[in-house]
Image (cartoon, grey):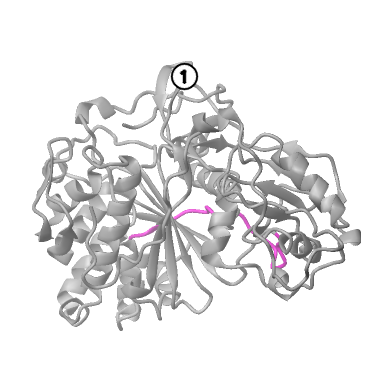
Amino acid sequence: MSIDPEQTTRRARRGSVPPRHGRQKRGAGVVLPAIAGVLAMGLALTGGYAAFAFTSLTNNVTKIDAIAPRSNDDDDDVDGQAQNILLVGDDHRPDNATPEEMAELSTEDDGGATNTDTMIVLHINADGSQATMISFPRDSYVDIPGVGKGKLNSAFYYGTLNGGGDTGGAKLLIQTIQELSGLTIDHYVRVSLLGFYQVVKELGPVEVCLNNAVKDPYSGVDLPAGTSELDAKQALSFVRQRHGLPNGDLDRNARQQYFLSQEARKVLSAGTLLNPIKMNAILSAVGGSIQTDTDLVSLGAQMRNLRPGNIQSATIPTLGTPTIRTNSGPLSIVEVDTVGLPAFVQGLVGEPEEYTKATAADPAATSVTVLNGSGVTGAAATATANLTARGFQAGAPGSSETTKTTQVQYPAGQESQAKAVAETVPGAVAVRSSAVTGVTLVLGSDGKTVSAPPSPDAPTDSGPSEPAQPEQSESRSSEPEPSSTDVKSYGKEGVCIN
């Protein structure tokens, strides 16, 4: 299901309610695997074709000014020299798409849509040897700056209004994801349905492995358990499937991550890299279907040391898929763990260097506020009292939206104070955040908290005790359970998925 951008909690201020983009004409709709081919193409550019590819790609790729300029000492860039590339897929149609090509995709030339179906941040570490694909489900219900609450896949549309065009759409989507995740987006790549269908077609059959047989009339997927080789049309069906999967769109994210990893393995095989005719066809297919802020040869150079086995996949933490009421009626959404998301991201990209080097401050010189996001009545008050007993300057306790992960949020410059608090809460994640002005302990449903200090006559050689677990309130059982966001390595040989 695709969201129409009018389905927001508050009316958008950027323009009139848009039309439904003709999506009804396509039944279940065609969903592009947003990065199918992008990473594979970047890896291919490390294989000796960079000089040729520069000319081929530069002549076709559309450049847009999607990234706002930043200073070199930007305090909000938590991962330093690492690169974050926002890879976006939608089913907009290139101007030169023929009716025959539309028919191949089981769609028609209805103008496509400006809602973005797939959004993945590709995080590449500083030396280019490791990467993580972080998927943001399209139905994530988030704050869109200047618009209000809406599904993430409508942010691009709102940015295009009032003359914003594709550049405005890219900028608003980037701003939304940056504020949601705490990551700084360094580059942007948007791809079309037709272009990446052609990439898969030129690449040739891609092997996938399923734990169980699947048959879904909505997407058209019909595959046995075990290994199968997919042509381009079967690949689209494979990454489109959400019906019949336990977690719907969340499992579809896993399909996209898995397929991309397998496609990257195919590109790096000798049969592809050493075949200049095939490489030429792949690069030609991708060029006319991309919008980006940078040249793709430079992007490929940043991946020079990357191999499929070193690519991890993850999906942002969520709290369920409830149906909510909007002005337009019932709306099924993905509820994001917005409080815990920056901590989850930091667990993938690593601590900021300033925090790693910091020495814990004295408790008496550390001010801290405790917020309760655990759903446990009185947890913040108990933790505040225990911090005070341990010598911290603790403010009045407060509340937070529900989150799974207990974390110590801190602004840049207060690393030492944050480390002092984190040391009193074993397992808590310290997260640099521009959303706070002082050190803030946010309690999550993982049960981690501040234990009372030992009494003066207590033995001192028994090691740290487990944190006390506050008594749970009756309302806790009604709160959603966070879904699994385990990190996967789909690029390794022999991996199968559901």
Residue lying at the far right in this picture: please name it: 364
Residue at horizontal 57 percent and vertical 68 percent from the top: 350
Q: Amino acid type of disc 1?
A: Arg
Q: Quadrant of the N terminus?
A: top left
Residue position marked by numbered label 1 in the rendering: 325
Magenta stretch encompasses residue 86: no
Q: Is residue 490 left or right of residue 175?
A: left
Instruction: Give percent across and percent down for residue 309.
Output: 33, 74
Instruction: Give percent across and percent down for residue 31.
Output: 27, 43
Looking at the image, which is closer to me, 307 or 17? Answer: 307
Residue at horizontal 75 percent and vertical 48 percent from the top: 436
Residue 457 position (above or below residue 136):
below
Instruction: Give percent across and percent down for residue 101.
Output: 14, 46
Residue 470 position (above or below residue 273):
above
Looking at the image, which is closer to me, 461 or 198? Answer: 461
- Which segment is the magenta one? 60-75
Instruction: Give percent across and percent down for residue 329.
Output: 42, 16
Residue at horizontal 56 percent and vertical 36 percent from the top: 144
Looking at the image, which is closer to me, 261 or 210? Answer: 210
Magenta stretch encompasses residue 68: yes
